[in-house]
Image (cartoon, coloured by chain):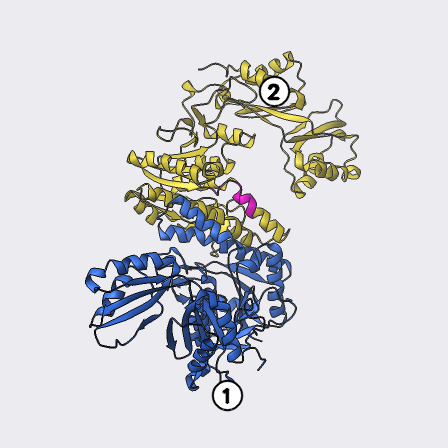
Chain colours: A blue, B yellow
Amino acid sequence: MARIVMKFGGTSVADLDRIRNVARHVQRETAAGNEVAVVVSAMAGETNRLVALCREAATIHDAREYDAVVSSGENVTSGLLAIVLQAMGIDARSWQGWQIPMRTDDAHGAARVEAIGTDVLSDRLSQGQVAVIAGFQGLSSLNRITTLGRGGSDTTAVAVAAALHADRCDIYTDVDGVYTTDPRIVRTARRLPRVSHEEMLEMASLGAKVLHVRAVELAMVHDVPVMVCSSFADPARPPVGTLITAEIDAMEQETVTSIAYARDEAQVTLRDVPDAPGVAYAVFGPLAEASIVVDMIVQNISEDGSATDITFTVPQSDFERAMAVVEAQRGTLGFGKLLGDTDVVKVSVIGIGMRSHAGVAATAFKALAERAINIRAITTSEIKISVLIDAAYTELAVRTLHAVYGLDKTP
Amino acid sequence: MARIVMKFGGTSVADLDRIRNVARHVQRETAAGNEVAVVVSAMAGETNRLVALCREAATIHDAREYDAVVSSGENVTSGLLAIVLQAMGIDARSWQGWQIPMRTDDAHGAARVEAIGTDVLSDRLSQGQVAVIAGFQGLSSLNRITTLGRGGSDTTAVAVAAALHADRCDIYTDVDGVYTTDPRIVRTARRLPRVSHEEMLEMASLGAKVLHVRAVELAMVHDVPVMVCSSFADPARPPVGTLITAEIDAMEQETVTSIAYARDEAQVTLRDVPDAPGVAYAVFGPLAEASIVVDMIVQNISEDGSATDITFTVPQSDFERAMAVVEAQRGTLGFGKLLGDTDVVKVSVIGIGMRSHAGVAATAFKALAERAINIRAITTSEIKISVLIDAAYTELAVRTLHAVYGLDKTP
């Protein structure tokens, strides 16, 4: 017997047929004698409808009222799933955020979970009652409804799993796990049986959108084993997907686990910037003040010690603003040219095993060079190498790297 | 300065244009220096959509989960109206039932209000903040969401008005008040400036659907002055409608205030029933057990003391069942014929003044006789005379009675 948390997103509860399908997944687990808490999102499209109503009500709106409105979609789904489970003879009840209570801070629209009332919930679970929890929502210290931001139901699920000391947290989605790369680009992409929290964090922030970044962080901090699997698989069979766990024994760890890419980057380059102390701050200070998140930053040592080039990337949606912010500093900075390009892509090689393996980066650079793919910028972390290249080479670069690290082959 | 409660139903908050219109009504009252609590229903059609989802989930469903689902429509409207009011520069916040809290009993789906937490609400009102309250919903002793049944937002409004000792409770709807009769039948029907709680109660139960029966009862018990007015009237002007108050001084009271009719009655007649003790119970006991509500009951004294006729009415939706229940008692009762008719209508003459006026009933019977309208059955109360007639005569009877009591003329 295990205690498990199961989370189902919007497409998995899109209508009553899909909700009945979710109930069959739950039934499989209760029939196996497991204690089950289910976290549900709003029916597909519902949150967008509610957000649109708030925007139509006023362009600038009280975040507390916005949260009260948009959280209502989850109330509907949790009640409906409880009804369907009961009709199948399974003891179940719905829980809204304030009933648990799911205590959060007061950051409406992007609240962080602070404490979860588990006494009653835990009692009910051990009595065999399924807890159907409305995801995405919480309760502030002022007794107002908060929401955890987009993808917040993932966070609810992991937070509940941590608080209830669950043995597993299964995230049901419309894909059956995490792949070595995007299967739409590389046909031989394989589903990874296991991925470490750290790797998943790199993948999540790089655009492999199976699991919300904050949920992964929370899972890492509380050491919650999370499995990503598909709600479209046969509900009668145990779920097969990708298990995201703490670091795996190095012996079984592949050096590189996956190749990710992000198309929504834009490149900004300042040529002939005076190579003097305080220059970096003069560039990036104003960008931070404008709430523009800078991702890659590259600055080379200048040859003669007088002038250098600075390149960085920002989200494409912030590109125009970033260019304007930098241009406004021209007088202060005294740079030569300001160049920008949105036709770029960031490709990343990820693997916890590269910590202990030399030459992983060199392999990537060599492979890309052989394909004549020009690297505009490079950044690295302990478990990731990212290169910025021309967008036209995206597929070629992803396929080349996927092959060169042997990800095509079953290990 | 007054403290007022304003209630807006589904058609008055059907979309954001209508919600903005509601906000302008609120603005008029706050600009006049009044303290305002607004009670809102779900957007038109929304509660029906949620009810349909529950029914699709399971034909028999947990009333607690049903309440959790169907109450969510009011959460959306209360949040949206708060946003719109704020955008107009009016301090406002939404209140869900559990936040107030609006304590009810545990009768899910038809809960009764037991206590309302008014301390914080009252403080906020006196600070000039508009309270936007989600109608229809409450909180049980077990911390579950309850609903007050259809038309429950009227009840919420009156209960809030009573608890907050409001000076007025204005019910905004799609008609501008209570009329002497249905204006679709009688063109000269007049809006009544004032109606007593007792009269309104008779009208409400008779099908004049401007105000929910339970809300009127509550207003009567707590002596809350309720005004029915139209949300479609110019928001810049003070509302004009019908004021429903405690009994009015007899001097200014008209004998008869209105003529109501109910088309959804069906007639059941038992001929040649033995005139013996216990017969009435033998007829109506089984009907009560089958949860069939009997309205009019007529039994005449038999001529020779051996056999009599019993006539009663039931809602048309229960007609077939009622006939079957009575038929099943044929052996026990030993009646002659069982007759039924759905082609009937109940027409009622209502007026608190008839208490002190003799001959009101005689006037009705004479007028109907002159038009050759046959009366099938008669029941009376202190302030009401109802007759059951052939449905074909509905309009003629209503017009005749409206005229004979002088309701056509401006008083």
Label 2 or label 1, whichever lies nearer to me, is 1
Q: Quadrant of the N terminus of chain B?
A: top left
Mark 1: secondary structure? helix
Residue type at numbered disc 2: Glu
Q: Which mark is residue A113?
A: none
Residue B43 in the figure: left or right of residue B323 = left
Q: Position of residue B20 (x, y in %)?
A: 39, 38
* Depth check, front residue: A375 or B210: A375
In front here: B296 or A98?
A98
Chain ID of residue with mark 1: A
Residue A41 vertical placement versus B85 (above, below): below
Q: Amino acid at mark 1?
A: Met
Q: Would residue B3 be found to the left or right of residue B218 on screen?
A: left
> What residue is rendered at 41% in x and 51% in y?
B101
Tell me where residue A310 sits by quadrant: bottom left
Alpha carbons under labels 2 and 1: distance apart? 91 Å
Please name the residue shown 36% across and 35% down the image: B24
- Badge 2 marks a residue whose secondary structure is helix
Observer-nearest of A71 and B364 = A71
Q: Does residue A242 appear in this view?
A: yes
CB-based contact (under 8 Å), mark 2 and mark 1: no
Please state, as top left, top right, bottom left or bottom right, where the C terminus of chain B lies in the image: top left
- Residue B357: image location, x then y, percent: 50, 17
Crowd tier of the residue under label 1, counting other residues whose Cα lies within 10 Å: few below 14, some 14–19, many 20 or above: few
Instruction: Give the residues drawn in magenta, as a range.
Output: B41-50
Q: Which residue is mark 1?
A: A251
Q: Residues within 10 Å of mark 2 (few under 14, many from 20)?
A: some
- In the image, which disc is placed on residue B395? 2
